Image: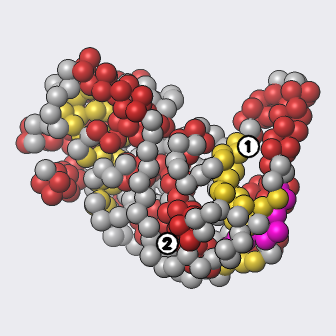
Amino acid sequence: MQDEKNILVVRLSSLGDVLMTIPAVIAIKNHLPGAHVSWLIEGPVGDFLSYQGFVEKVIRFPRKKVVNNLKNGYLKEAFGLLRGFVRELRAIEYDLILDFHGILKSIILSKIARGKRLIGFDNTYAKEKSHLLYDERIKGTDKRLHKVERNMLIANYLGAGRGIPDTRLTVPQRYFGYIDDFFKEAGILGDIFAINPFSSPGSGFKRWGFDRYVQLIRKIRAQLGVYILILWGPGEKEEAEALVKESGRGVFLACPTDISQLFALLKRVKLYISGDTGVMHLAASAKTPVVAIFGPTDHRINAPYGTDSMVVRKDIACSPCKNRGCKNRICLDSITADEVFQAVQTMYKRNK
């Protein structure tokens, strides 16, 4: 294994899944300290990944740009982007290609790359029959194994040991300066909690209710007296502003952020509160205490990893489920603001 010098990691998206792959990649890098790690990814998380010292090269799959060009009839531009991408992907012959994603798209891209060994999961975790095309398959264990531990199965297979390494992620100082300037201009002093009431597009079924967040924020302000920062992303600003208005004094709208700026912000706050989102995993990666509100998604697979977090959920027969169109949201609607506040209070006292 010490001869494996060029490694391609394939985990295309999303933010949370990329973050839950990082411990396995660090374990592999620690086991093979001379290895050159490239990471194939798509979307804005690639910029954040490029700042991490365990990755030498980030290869960006320009799917969105290609699709947009094709939709607008710019065929030359689309194929030009694809040619450039394929040239970059094939520039190195990899000793190992590790497909952590396990879908048809990831296996196609893995096959386009030049590699000696292509490794992925068997059909326990891989989807869309992608497992049939791997050279070596990692046997899955528990279907409900946490994704961090699931990804570590590949590291273990490569001899990287069974301990999950500590992850210390970073971004350049300018991102912290941007957040410090925002806090100063807003007049935010003292302890701050960040609340993200939203979820990724198409995942509204995971969101706790707007009114419940209002109740929670008012209770936090009345009993703990800390400032509250409402986070938001593309298409969410208007609703975030409404939440700020409904919640009263001491509640602020966060500044616009990309992933690296958001990481810097999360490093500056005392506690993070949200549902099951990628930003929840970013907060955990920033070593910020987390209170996570889980409904239909599986906390055993997707909870913030580590000891400095609490999950608030109801143990009901139909949860977890994958019914995105569920009309009976009992798994979320039965969680009260008082119950979440108790977790918030516990985590705050623990980390004060």
The residue that disc 1 covers is 61
Q: Position of residue 273 (x, y in %)?
A: 30, 47
Spatial separation of the CA atoms under disc 1 and disc 2: 26 Å
Q: Which residues are magenta?
A: 113-121
The residue that disc 2 covers is 149
> Residue 308 sits in which quadrant?
bottom left
Q: Position of residue 40 (x, y in %)?
A: 69, 51
Q: Is residue 319 magenta?
A: no
Residue in view at x 45 percent, y 71 percent: 164
Q: Position of residue 265 (x, y in %)?
A: 35, 36
| Amino acid tagged 2 | Glu
Residue in view at x 40 percent, y 63 percent: 166
| Amino acid tagged 1 | Phe
Instruction: State whether residue 107 appears in this view.
Output: no
Residue at the right extreme, as displayed: 76
Assign a secondary structure to mark 1.
Answer: loop
Is residue 11 positioned above or below 118 on the image? above
Q: Position of residue 281 (x, y in %)?
A: 43, 52
Residue in view at x 41 percent, y 54 percent: 168
Residue 308: image tag: none
